[in-house]
Image (cartoon, helix red, strand yellow):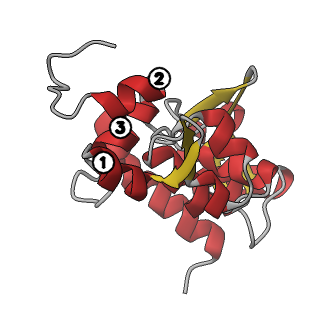
Amino acid sequence: MPSRIKTIWKNMRQRCYNPNFIYYHNYGGRGITVCDEWQDFHTFEQWAYTNGYSDDLTIDRINTNGNYEPSNCRWTTMKVQTNNKRNNRLITYNGKTQTESQWADELGISFTVLRNRLHKGFPLDKAFEDKDLREADKITYQGKTQTISEWARETGVNRKNISRRLGRGWSLDKVFSLQNFNYKTATN
């Protein structure tokens, strides 16, 4: 059975050079390659041991559009690597940009709760600062506080449309006043 480092090395090369490999399109298919010196396993293994390799870490490309090479790779935890994926949703709030997962950790909110709030169209300040989900799900309008579902029943505006409109930063008057609206042709 090959060592863990050898398996990492083989998989790295498969991602970059084997068009039949399941993830090739994310690596070799995008032009990502392995540097010449790492074509030799022993050179890669030596680099790994002198640059922090341990069995609980994975190889991570610092620049997700860069190649596998010593200046662009590091050994990290899966959590760090997951936050370094190119398909992460980055959110800027108060001048700071992080992934949804990093914001959830920093704010002490579960990732699922934060993602659901953002998907529902909550303004960032409400999604980030309101730790009590039951309170965060409520909207106060004209002195009355209700959930989105309750507002939908009362106003006749579809729940999904309310969330979508809130996510676009519309005023509450506009959110609750337009019942039939074509989003494809509209501008705020």
- Mark 2: give few (<14), some (14-19) or many (20+) Cα within 10 Å: few
Which numbered dot is residue 80?
A: none
Of badges 2 and 3, nearer the viewer stands 2
Residue under the point 29% across and 41% down: 161
Residue marked by disc 1: 160
As measured in the structure, the alpha-carbon distance from the residue carrying label 1 to the one carrying label 2 is 16 Å
| x and y, in percent, of residue 51 in the image | 82, 49
Residue 89 image point, x, y percent: 51, 39
Cα distance between the residues tagged 1 and 3: 6 Å
For the image shown, how many numbered marks are present on the structure?
A: 3
Read off the residue under disc 3.
164
Residue 58: in sight, yes or no? no
Label 3 neighbour load within 10 Å: few <14, some 14-19, many 20+: some
Q: Which residue is mark 2?
A: 171
Residue at 53% x, 41% y: name it: 122
Residue drawn at the location 68% of the way across and 34% of the way down: 125
Query: Is there CB contact under 8 Å for labels 1 and 3?
Result: yes
Which mark sits nearer the N-terminus, 2 or 3?
3
Q: Is residue 21 above or below residue 32?
A: below
x and y, in percent, of residue 92 in the image: 65, 27
Whether label 2 touches label 3, CB < 8 Å:
no
Residue kind at label 3, given as amino acid type: Arg
- The secondary structure type at the circle numbered 3 is helix
- Nearest to the observer: residue 24 or residue 111: 111
Element type at mark 2: loop
In the displayed structure image, the side of residue 109 where residue 113 appears, left or right? left
User: Which image quarter: residue 113?
Assistant: bottom right
